[in-house]
Each structure stands twice: as C-alpha cells, then as structure tokens.
Image (cartoon, rainbow, N blue to C red):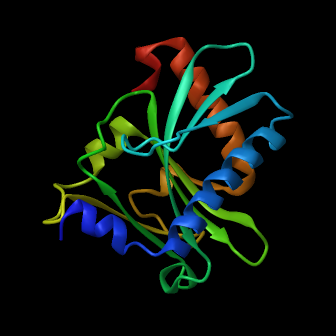
Amino acid sequence: MSEDEEYWEKSPAAARMGKAAEHLVAAFAILATGGELNVSTSLVDDEGVDLVFHRRGSSTTLAVQVKARMSTASQVQQDRLMASVRSQTFRPRSDLDLLFVAVNVEQGVIMKAWLIPGPAFGAMVSKPNSRGRFRFSASMKPASMDRWTPFRLEAAELPRRILTRLGELEEGPASNQ
C-alpha cells in the first residue's frame, strides 16, 4: 500500500481523536505549569513533529511527535501501549522527543505517558519493519520493568518532565546524552 493509500485509509475518527489527544497534551502542559510552558502546533504533519514546546522567556524549543492510544483500544485495556513510528519522518536529534500517551476517553485525561528523547529512541529500536515502521510496545503495569520503563510517566509528571528536557537542551549537548 502506498503512503497516499494509507493516508486515505486512515479513519477520520482516528485522525480526530489523535488531534484531540495532541491538544489535550498541549493544554495540560500549559495549565499544569501555570503558563510557564507554551506550545505551538504544526499546520502540516509531514516531518513527524506535532507539538513544539518552549519555556516562557526562552528561545529553546523541544519538538515532540505524539502517538496516542485511546482507552477503548484492546491493547490499552490490557495495560499495553503499542504504536509505530514512520522511519521516513523519524530522524534522531537532541531536540526531538517521542511522546506516547494512553488517553482515557471517558474522562478526557492522560493515563500514562512515555517521553523519549529522539537519540534514545533511535538507539533502542530495531530496524524498521517491512512497512518502514519502528515498533513501540510498552507495559502500563506499575510493576513492569520493560526497556521503556525509565521513560514511563504518570500524567502529573509529564509537564515537569518537558520542562526538564527543555532545561537539558538549554544547558547544551553534553547534558542530553
């Protein structure tokens, strides 16, 4: 299936829900930091960047690709978040993080999140599959210790972690290792 066919095959509801999840993340980050964080969105998502965060009074930015899964999905109901990242748009760089979120659609809240710096994600994933996708699969169970556990966050931790990542970028390359 070509990229164009795949785009048109995607459910309009799925695209709406994904965009809503991005806005949920953005609004939550602004509110939970008392306006210290600001967020910009992309008009076109052809470079794998959905949100761009920056701290008030700073020019440093953190680009974020958001992959959301809803509580109605069978894998999320089984405490697992699975997603894929297109190899065509993913280029590991220090100012790009991948954010995987499970969203409770009934309550309109983030359940769990994984904020993974691009270089770490690039080092931890294997080769893309036959469709050019990197696979992400992580347990949402509190006691799990899979390879993504160091990046797993409770919803309330996410805004502060974004501020921490911006601080690392402001300090320079030596701090983002």
Among the 4 quarters of the image, the one containing residue 40: top right
The x and y percentages for residue 54 are 64, 25
Report the residue that reaches farthest toward the left.
130
Q: Work out which quarter of the rendered image holds the N terminus and state it.
A: bottom left
Q: Is residue 52 above or below residue 88?
A: above
Q: Out of 80 and 45, give the one closest to the viewer.
A: 45
26 relative position to 51: left or right: right
The x and y percentages for residue 131 are 18, 65
153 relative position to 87: left or right: right
Total number of numbered discs in the rendering: 0
162 relative position to 67: left or right: right
The x and y percentages for residue 88 are 23, 47
> Residue at the spot x=46%, y=39% of the render?
97
The x and y percentages for residue 38 are 71, 31
Q: Is residue 32 above or below residue 136?
A: above
Q: Out of 144 and 38, give the one closest to the viewer.
A: 38
Q: Work out which quarter of the rendered image holds the C terminus and state it.
A: top left
> Residue at the spot x=29%, y=49% of the render?
124
> Residue at the spot x=65%, y=60% of the render?
20
147 relative position to 155: left or right: left
